[in-house]
Image (cartoon, rainbow, N blue to C red):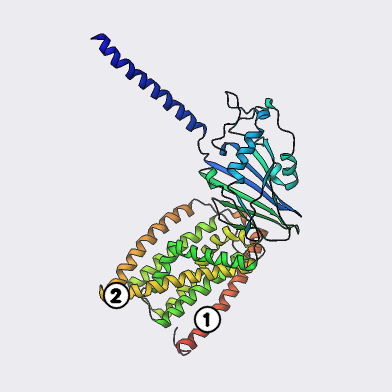
Amino acid sequence: MKPLITSIISPALAAIAFSALIFDAACQRAEAHEVPTNVVVQTIVKPNDDHVNLLVRVPLEAMRDINFPQTRAGYLVISEADSFLRDAAAIWIGQELALYQNDEQLIDWAIEAVHLSLPSDRSFESYDTAMLIVHSIPLADDEDLHVDQAMFDMLIRYPITSADTEFSIEPNFARLGLQTTTIVRYLHPDGTDRIYRFAGDPGVLRLDPRWHHAFSHFVVAGVDHILDGVDHLLFVICLLIPFRRIRPLIVIVTSFTVAHSITLGASALGMVPNFLWFPALIETLIAMSIVYMAFENIVGAQWQKRWIIAFAFGLVHGFGFSFALAEIMQFAGGHLVTSLLAFNIGVELGQLAVIVLAVPLISFLFRKIVSERVGTILLSALVAHSGWHWMSDRASQLSEYSFNWSMIGYAFSVSMIRWLMLLVVIATVLWIMTRIYRSFLGVTGTDTL
C-alpha cells in the first residue's frame, strides 16, 4: 500500500512544487516590468537646415521588457548597456512617436546617441546642455545607478528638405506609465521658443500652428467643453424650461452669450484675480446659479426679467469657461485673439445644439405627457437637487481657503483698477442691450423690460 501511496503523492508534490516555482518566477518578472505610476517625458524639437533633432528624456523604468544589464542588487552595468539602450529607444520611442513635415510623416530616422543620467541631472532645461549630455561619455559602473532611478536620454535625427516648413508631432507616450505627462519644447528656426505640457496622448500636435489650425482646434475644444460641462448644460436648460418661444429664446440666450463672452475675453487678457480661492468661488457660484434658476422656475418666472438674470450669471459662467480655456491656450501658438474667438464660437455652437434638441423635447413632454406647470416644477426640482449637491460640495472646498489681508497691496490695487474698467464695460454693454431689447420687443420707455 505504501509504495502505491508514495507513487501517487510524490508526482503530485513535484507538480505543486514546479507550479510554485513557475508562479514565483512569473511574479518576479511581472514585478520587474511593472508599469510605472507617474512618468514625465521631456522632449526638445529643433529643426536645422537638413534635419530635425529630437531630444527625449524618459525614466528608464518606463522602458519595460528590456533586460538591461544589472547586478543582483538592481544597479546598472552601464558599460554593457549601450545596445540595450538603443533597442529601447527604437522600440519604445522611435517606432511609436510620429514627426510630420507639412502633414507628411517623416519615416526615415536614426538613433544618433543614447545616454544614462542621474535623476538629479538638469541638462534638459536647455537645448545646448541637453545636446552636451547625450554626447558625453557614459557614466562609470561604480556610479551605483539603480535601474529604477536612471534617466534615459536619447537623440533621434530626422532628415528633412527644409527647416522653414510646418512641423507636427504625435507623441504616443501615454502607454509608458499609468499617468504620463509630456513636455514638448519646440525651438523654431526664427528663435521662437514654444513649450507644450499635457497629460496622455494629445493626438497630432502642431508645433507652430497657423491661424486656421488654431481656429479649428479651439472651435472643437469649445464644443467639447460645453457638452462635457454638465453644470453649464443644466443652467442653459433651466433658462429655457419656462420660455421656449422664439423671441424670449433670442433675448435670453443672447444675454447669456454676450455676458460670458465679456468675462471670457477679460480672463484671456489677464484680468482674472490671481487668487487660489477664485476658481473655487466661481465653481460655487455656477452651482448656485443653477439652484437659483431652478427655484425661480418653480415659484414662477417672468421672461422680461429673465434676460437680466441670464446676463448676470453669464458673467460668472464666462469665468468658468476661462479656466478650461487657460489649460489649452498653450496650443494657440501666436494666435491668441483667433483662439479666443474660436473657443467662444465653439461654446455657442455646443450651446445652440443643446437648445435645438432640448426645446422640442421639453415642448413634447409638456404637450403629451404632463402639463406645463407641473412639468416645469418637476424638471426644475430635479435640476435643483443636482445643483444643491454641487453647491454644497464646492462651498465646502471654498471654505478651506483663507483670505489673507496681507494680499491687499499694490498688485491688488492694480487688479481693482482693471476690475473697475471691466465693470464700466459691463455697464455699457448692459445699457446698449436694454435699448436694443426695448426696440426689439416693442416696449415703451415707461414699461419694464
Q: Which amino acid does the dot numbered 2 rest on?
A: Phe
- Percent of width and height locating residue 160: 71, 55
* Residue with the most extreme left position: 1
Mark 1 residue element: helix
Given residues 16 and 248, the one toward you in this image is 16
> How dense is the environment of label 2, judged by Cα within 10 Å: few (below 14), some, or many (20 and up)?
some
Residue 249 badge: none
Inter-mark Cα distance, 1 to 2: 31 Å
- Percent of width and height locating residue 195: 66, 54
Given residues 267 and 291, the one toward you in this image is 267
* Residue highlighted by disc 1: 433
Query: Mark 1–mark 2 contact, CB under 8 Å?
Result: no
- Residue 204 against residue 302 in the figure, above or below: above
- Percent of width and height locating residue 226: 47, 65
Give whichever of discs 1 and 2 has the lower sequence position: 2
Visible in this render: residue 417?
no
Quarter holding the C terminus is: bottom left
- Residue 398 against residue 424 in the figure, above or below: above
Visible in this render: residue 362?
yes
Quarter holding the N terminus is: top left
> How many marks can you see?
2
The answer to which quarter of the image holds residue 101 is: bottom right
Q: Which amino acid does the dot numbered 1 rest on?
A: Met
Residue at the spot x=58%, y=70% of the render? 341
* Residue with the most extreme top position: 2
Could you tell whether 356 is left or right of 332 in the image?
left
**In front of the other: label 1 or label 2?**
2
Residue 366 badge: 2
The answer to which quarter of the image holds residue 409 is: bottom right
> How dense is the environment of label 1, judged by Cα within 10 Å: few (below 14), some, or many (20 and up)?
some
